[in-house]
Image (cartoon, grey):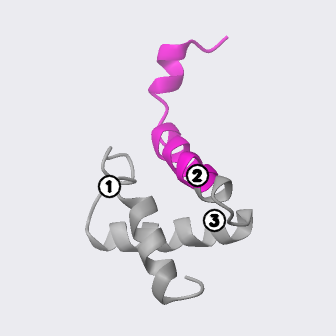
Amino acid sequence: MVSYQDRRKQPGRGHDGRRSTVRGWLVDHGMRVNEAEAWCDAWEKVVIARDVHPEDPVYWTGATTWIVEQRKTRRSP
């Protein structure tokens, strides 16, 4: 059995969990799942361009705000 501490050490878990949280928030606010995935992909391109590592806690900070603002000016990522 894998302990809680062992799971916390697995690379990618934090990133995947935060992405899932953002995707879930978007879906809860009326976005289709595939559209939410596309916006998460678009956010990742932006934040990678800012040279932020996916495991950095600030990687997903601001994602929902950025996506909401971008949707005001364009239909899809």
| Disc 3 to disc 1, C-alpha distance | 19 Å
In this figure, which residue is indicated by the disc labeled 1?
Answer: 53
The x, y position of residue 76, in whole percent, is 59, 84
The x, y position of residue 68, in whole percent, is 47, 70
Q: Amino acid at mark 1?
A: His
In this figure, which residue is indicated by the disc labeled 2?
Answer: 25
The residue positioned 31% from the left and 74% from the top of the image is 49
The x, y position of residue 17, in whole percent, is 54, 41
Q: Amino acid at mark 3?
A: Glu
Q: Amino acid at mark 2?
A: Trp
Quadrant housing residue 46? bottom left
Q: Earlier in the sequence, mark 3 or mark 2?
A: 2
Main SS of the magenta segment? helix
Q: Provide the secondary structure element on which disc 2 rests.
A: helix
| Disc 3 to disc 2, C-alpha distance | 11 Å
Quadrant housing residue 38? bottom right
Q: Is residue 17 left or right of residue 66?
A: right
Image height of 63 relative to 2, above or below = below
Question: Label for residue 21?
Answer: none
